Image (cartoon, helix red, strand yellow):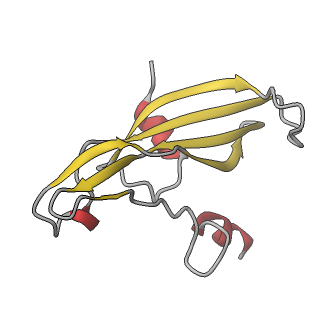
Amino acid sequence: MIHAERVKATLPPEIDWERYELTSFRIVKNEDPESNDILEKRILVEITERNIIPKQLKKYKKVVSHWSAKDIHINDFPQRAMACTLVFKRKRWKIVDTWKVVCIDIEPKEDGTRWTRELLAFLK
């Protein structure tokens, strides 16, 4: 059983939980022989986009969920001596009026930097 609220408390606060849901939380062995990771285990957290039209697309009259987009893998801060990977499962959205298919990007970093807000605060 996933204790969703406890897991969410350890994740980056920028995640929009109205738009995403926690679908999986498991601990897996690091099996990549080329990995420079000295940690033996990895926390794998899967977060899936809900079938709710993103606010960026609300200006269009009709938008429908089209397909799943390519997953985004983000290596997050280690927790309890384990690496942590967030896997975002996103949707593609079709704007019916224009037949354009779009996917809303996830920006895990602060504008103008290559780091997250939490890491920047830690480095201060």
Residue 119: image location, x then y, percent: 67, 65
Q: Residue furthest left?
A: 61
In percent of the image, x 39 and y 56: which residue is there? 103
Q: Is residue 87 left or right of residue 51?
A: right
Compared to residue 74, the image places residue 67 above or below, namely above
State the image quarter where residue 63 is shown.
bottom left
In percent of the image, x 55 and y 78: which residue is there? 111
Residue 71: image location, x then y, percent: 52, 43
Q: Residue furthest top?
A: 1
State the image quarter where residue 62 is shown.
bottom left
In percent of the image, x 59 and y 25: which residue is there? 26
Quadrant where the image shows the N terminus: top left
Compared to residue 53, the image places residue 109 above or below, namely below
Residue 7: image location, x then y, percent: 50, 37
State the image quarter where residue 99 is shown.
bottom left
The count of marks equals: 0
